[in-house]
């Protein structure tokens, strides 16, 4: 098994705040777009490499995170797919999300399954 990929990124908005309703559909919220930009640059700066095929992820959220844990995983997974760190989130075989003793940023650990 290869070495894990360990990343830090800002805490994403909750799924409840990702999109706004429009007259004819939905659009990403300003907050979500800002997070995608900031987290995307942070991700690129760390040069994470890629995982092909099945993978596992651990997400450690900082102290004081008040959103439902499951609502914070989706934007992170989507960002990893968008930046081609992983092929598709359908290949995620294990997902762990926990409040941890980190400060300010999420700590993401990815492993090939």
Image (cartoon, helix red, strand yellow):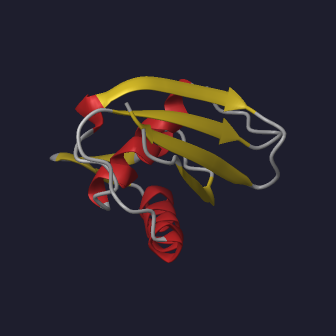
Position of residue 20 relative to residue 72, above or below, is below
| Residue 14 drawn at (x, y percent) | 53, 39
Q: Nearer the viewer, residue 77 or 37?
A: 77
| Residue 78 drawn at (x, y percent) | 34, 46
Specify the quadrant that holds the N terminus.
Answer: top left
Position of residue 77 relative to residue 9, above or below, is above
Position of residue 111 relative to residue 33, above or below, is above
Q: So how many labels did they put on this image?
A: 0
| Residue 102 drawn at (x, y percent) | 80, 46
Q: Nearer the viewer, residue 35 or 8?
A: 8
Residue drawn at point x = 84 percent, y = 39 percent: 101
- As drawn, the residue found furthest toward the left would be 24
Specify the quadrant that holds the C terminus.
Answer: top left
Side of 82 relative to 9 (left or right): left
Q: Quadrant of residue 44?
A: bottom left
Side of 8 relative to 23 (left or right): right
Residue drawn at point x = 77 percent, y = 55 percent: 104
Position of residue 80 relative to residue 93, above or below, is below
Residue drawn at point x = 56 percent, y = 43 percent: 109
Side of 55 relative to 35 (left or right): left
- As drawn, the residue found furthest toward the front would be 1
| Residue 31 drawn at (x, y percent) | 51, 59
Q: Nearer the viewer, residue 15 or 47?
A: 47
């Amino acid at each position: 098994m290869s070495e894990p990929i360990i990343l830090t990124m800002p805490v994403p908005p909750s799924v409840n705040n990702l999109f706004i309703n429009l007259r004819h559909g939905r659009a990403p919220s300003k907050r979500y777009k800002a997070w995608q930009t900031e987290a995307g640059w942070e991700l690129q700066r760390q040069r994470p490499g890629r995982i092909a095929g099945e993978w596992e992820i651990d997400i450690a959220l900082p102290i004081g995170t008040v959103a439902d844990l499951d609502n914070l995983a989706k934007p992170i997974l989507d960002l990893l797919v968008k930046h081609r760190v992983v092929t598709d989130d359908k290949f995620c075989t294990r997902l762990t999300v926990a409040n941890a003793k980190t400060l300010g940023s999420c700590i993401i650990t990815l492993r090939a399954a």
